[in-house]
């Protein structure tokens, strides 16, 4: 058995053991089951949630918002990154701007944005997209810096124009870096979308649902169920993107 | 990152900051609206809220103990506990690669959970207040440093291991004088991340579950459309995060001086 | 002092078992330098690590001072090939040399003195406060040697110690080993793939075969105790010995 498969199997076994112990602790009342419910009850609740139409609507709404945010961020950040990456002067200024903006946690801006611009779905998408642009942008710029000049010279030797070089040499080269950035953005935009839904819990969304129906009613299995769902979602998406990266971009050797 | 020298980079950064502020000041003065007050107005509000006290108190006003101190306390306590626990647990797990393997499933899942999602959980469990916030910060920010500590402990060079065994270095000394320094670079990288997460969790938990603190200032201002106070709160949170990060980086630079110099040499 | 009796090592079990070392017997007497030469992959390093107690062997016994070695013995030091990974980058040179002594009953001052003496004996007294990565490869290996010397082992094991340094430095380090042995009457078991080095340094040369490894032969090196890189290597006896070793290796 290869090392990595062994590790995955053990990880799975470890997780199952943990869940088993947790369930045991609950059933034997070592832990107060009304305080912290066991995994079986949480699982049941999650199942029940997906059977509720209202939840499904909210859940899909969040997923859509998340997807749109990532896509918008990608569509903006990749060309922008390609552009800025080819102009060293702008690059320097940009990094200084970002360094300056970095200390401001995006979540702090949420109440401000909600107050100023109302609470439609667009707001959380815009905020999430804004926060997710940076990882993609920087990964693209970093990737451009790493393009082996040999490739570019080869293209020039074949008299490829600037656009052609950009499309056929630079773009494929930065693709794995961009994908890494997108993976990071996926995590960040989920956090921003859900945080916005928490704070503005009158709207539609997974976060709002959990707050309204779980937090405010003291429904522990529900709120933990929410965590589980978000965790699994995050794992799935990260796993998918990582898998895509390994399959399509196994040729990429560095950084990404 | 792209500047010719470190000094040039710093100058560049502050230059851009100043230009940014000036442009904002001009734009906000010209276009009259309330959502984006001028930087001068924001600064004024910061002073009014917190720094208009008597000189004997370092100009700190009375509201500081309601707004700023609780936030700092929670953040510092929560982050410190999360960091120490993360390092201890992480290194313990990392020492045995079998144990680390078995833990890897649970750890990978916890890393994928957006920390913010833990806020409702702890609100339900502990209700509004300090316990809830501390629990949120600790439970939410421990993972990066824990995972990095595991990784750091696992990846101690086998040659160092053989060396320590050949010279019969005892288990405790092995951990404190070899594993810990060897894992230190990864641990510090984890610490910087979990500081950022702790800050976010502090703010968010104060948005929804606290009667005081900077997050409360911001949401309170939200109810009265008091944009100046909102921005003042945002500014102070950012300042807090910035200073704490700088502090951590300064500590890291001293503790990892050997690492920075040696890797620079290898790359050079 | 050191007795290796029917040492063997097999990786894996059953049908997939791979006999790395078949049967190795030899002894090392006090004050000797014994060089072990063998083709790549013949398990020389495994052999050395087994003697150091770092590796558990399948069959056979190792006796040091008449007592069987089961774990890492207390009066033995190892110098590894990869010095950059064996030294600790977060410690200064002198602290690196002191490090193995920290668990002993010596006082701080005594530890520091021993470390500084050891550094002086390898010619590195002046770089005590520097860090290993600030030194050249040859100097780093000398620090590793100083560390072993400060430990005052009765047996020094060296695992291809000069394979990672350039040829010129290699010569300097070989002479250092000879000086150290003369000054401290140390017993040394040195593994190398370099035939010339094995004859230059050794009082005896042990030639190993390919896997499954056995001792092909042991040659006594009848060269004068005082050796010189140019004179000795040009001597008739040296040439004869190294050809003999080369022939045995090809066997």
Image (tube, helix red, strand yellow):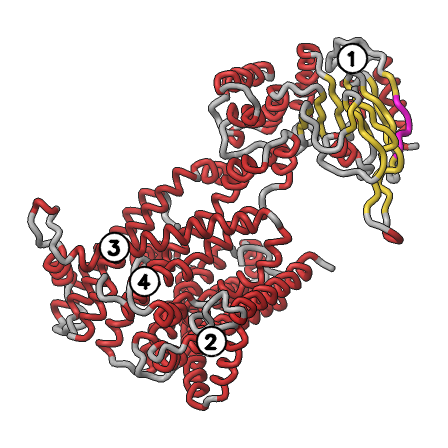
Residue to which mark 1 is pinned: C232
Task: Report whether residue A165 is seen.
Answer: no
Q: CA distance from mark 4 to mark 3?
A: 11 Å
Q: Secondary structure at mark 1?
A: helix
Quarter assignment of residue C62: top right
Quarter assignment of residue A115: bottom left
From the viewer's perspective, is C218 left or right of C125? right
* Residue C139, above or below A152: above
Q: Secondary structure at mark 2?
A: helix
- Crowdedness of circle 3 by 10 Å Cα count: few (<14), some, many (20+)? some
Residue to which mark 3 is pinned: B239
Q: In the rendered structure, which segment of residues is drawn in magenta?
A: C214-218
| Residue C198 in the image, given as x and y percentages of width and height | 79, 23
Q: Secondary structure at mark 4?
A: loop
Q: Quadrant of the N terminus of chain A?
A: bottom right
Q: Quadrant of the C terminus of chain A?
A: bottom right
Residue to which mark 2 is pinned: A225
For disc 1, the chain is C
From the viewer's perspective, is C70 left or right of C23? left
| Residue A152 in the image, given as x and y percentages of width and height | 54, 58
Task: Tell which tag, 1 or 4, sits nearer the viewer.
Answer: 4
Q: Are marks 3 and 2 in contact (CB under 8 Å)?
A: no
């Amino acid at each position: 058995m290869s090392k990595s498969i062994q590790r995955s199997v053990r990880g799975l076994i470890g997780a199952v053991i943990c869940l088993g112990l947790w369930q045991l602790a609950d059933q034997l009342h070592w832990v107060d089951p009304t305080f912290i419910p066991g995994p079986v009850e949480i699982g049941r609740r999650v199942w029940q949630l997906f059977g509720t139409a209202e939840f499904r609507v909210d859940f899909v709404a969040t997923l859509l918002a998340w997807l749109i945010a990532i896509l918008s961020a990608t569509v903006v950040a990749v060309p922008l990154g390609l552009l800025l990456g080819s102009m060293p002067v702008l690059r320097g200024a940009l990094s200084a701007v970002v360094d300056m903006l970095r200390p401001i946690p995006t979540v702090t801006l949420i109440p401000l944005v909600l107050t100023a611009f109302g609470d439609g779905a667009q707001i959380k998408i815009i905020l999430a997209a804004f926060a997710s642009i940076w990882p993609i942008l920087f990964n693209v710029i970093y990737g451009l810096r790493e393009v082996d000049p040999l490739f570019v010279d080869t293209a020039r030797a074949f008299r490829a124009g600037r656009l052609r070089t950009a499309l056929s040499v630079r773009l494929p080269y930065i693709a794995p870096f961009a994908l890494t950035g997108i993976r990071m953005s996926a995590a960040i935009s989920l956090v921003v979308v859900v945080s916005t839904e928490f704070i503005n819990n009158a709207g539609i969304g997974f976060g709002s649902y959990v707050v309204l129906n779980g937090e405010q009613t003291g429904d522990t299995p529900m709120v933990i169920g929410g965590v589980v769902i978000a965790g699994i979602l995050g794992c799935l998406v990260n796993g998918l993107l990582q898998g895509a990266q390994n399959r399509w971009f196994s040729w990429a050797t560095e950084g990404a | 990152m792209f500047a010719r020298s470190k000094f040039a980079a710093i100058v560049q950064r502050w230059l851009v900051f100043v230009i940014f502020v000036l442009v904002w000041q001009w734009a906000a003065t010209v276009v009259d609206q309330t959502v984006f007050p001028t930087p001068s107005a924001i600064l004024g509000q910061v002073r009014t809220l917190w720094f208009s006290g008597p000189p004997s108190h370092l100009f700190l006003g009375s509201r500081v103990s309601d707004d700023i101190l609780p936030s700092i306390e929670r953040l510092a306590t929560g982050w410190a506990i999360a960091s120490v626990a993360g390092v201890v647990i992480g290194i313990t797990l990392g020492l045995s690669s079998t144990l680390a393997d078995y833990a890897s499933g649970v750890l990978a899942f916890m890393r994928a959970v957006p920390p913010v999602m833990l806020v409702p959980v702890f609100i339900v469990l502990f209700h509004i207040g300090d316990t809830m916030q501390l629990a949120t910060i600790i439970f939410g920010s421990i993972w990066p440093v824990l995972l990095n500590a595991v990784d750091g402990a696992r990846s101690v060079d086998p040659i160092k291991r053989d060396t320590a065994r050949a010279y019969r270095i005892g288990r405790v000394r092995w951990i404190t004088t070899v594993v810990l320094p060897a894992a230190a670079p990864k641990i510090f990288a984890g610490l910087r991340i979990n500081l950022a997460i702790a800050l976010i969790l502090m703010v968010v938990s104060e948005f929804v579950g606290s009667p005081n603190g900077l997050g409360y200032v911001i949401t309170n201002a939200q109810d009265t459309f008091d944009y100046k106070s909102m921005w003042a709160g945002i500014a102070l949170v950012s300042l807090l995060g910035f200073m704490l990060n700088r502090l951590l980086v300064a500590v890291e630079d001293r503790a990892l001086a050997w690492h920075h110099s040696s890797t620079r040499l290898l790359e050079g | 002092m050191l007795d290796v009796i029917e040492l063997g090592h097999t990786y894996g079990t059953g049908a997939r078992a791979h006999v790395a070392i078949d049967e190795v017997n030899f002894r090392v007497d006090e004050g000797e330098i014994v060089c072990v030469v063998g083709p790549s992959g013949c398990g020389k390093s495994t052999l050395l690590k087994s003697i150091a107690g770092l590796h558990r062997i399948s069959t056979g016994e190792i006796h040091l001072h008449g007592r069987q070695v089961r774990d890492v013995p207390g009066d033995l030091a190892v110098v590894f090939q990869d010095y950059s990974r064996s030294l600790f980058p977060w410690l200064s040179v002198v602290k690196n040399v002191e490090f193995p002594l920290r668990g002993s009953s010596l006082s701080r001052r005594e530890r520091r003195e021993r470390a500084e003496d050891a550094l002086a004996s390898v010619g590195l007294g002046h770089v005590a406060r520097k860090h290993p990565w600030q030194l050249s490869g040859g100097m780093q290996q000398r620090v590793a040697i100083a560390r072993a010397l400060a430990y005052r082992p009765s047996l020094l094991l060296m695992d291809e110690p000069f394979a990672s340094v350039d040829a010129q430095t290699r010569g300097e380090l070989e002479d250092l080993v000879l000086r150290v042995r003369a000054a401290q009457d140390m017993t040394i078991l040195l593994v190398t793939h370099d035939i010339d080095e094995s004859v230059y340094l050794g009082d005896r040369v042990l030639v190993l075969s390919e896997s499954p490894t056995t001792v092909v032969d042991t040659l006594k090196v009848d060269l004068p105790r005082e050796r010189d890189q140019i004179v000795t290597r040009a001597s008739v006896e040296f040439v004869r010995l190294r050809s003999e070793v080369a022939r045995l290796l090809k066997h």
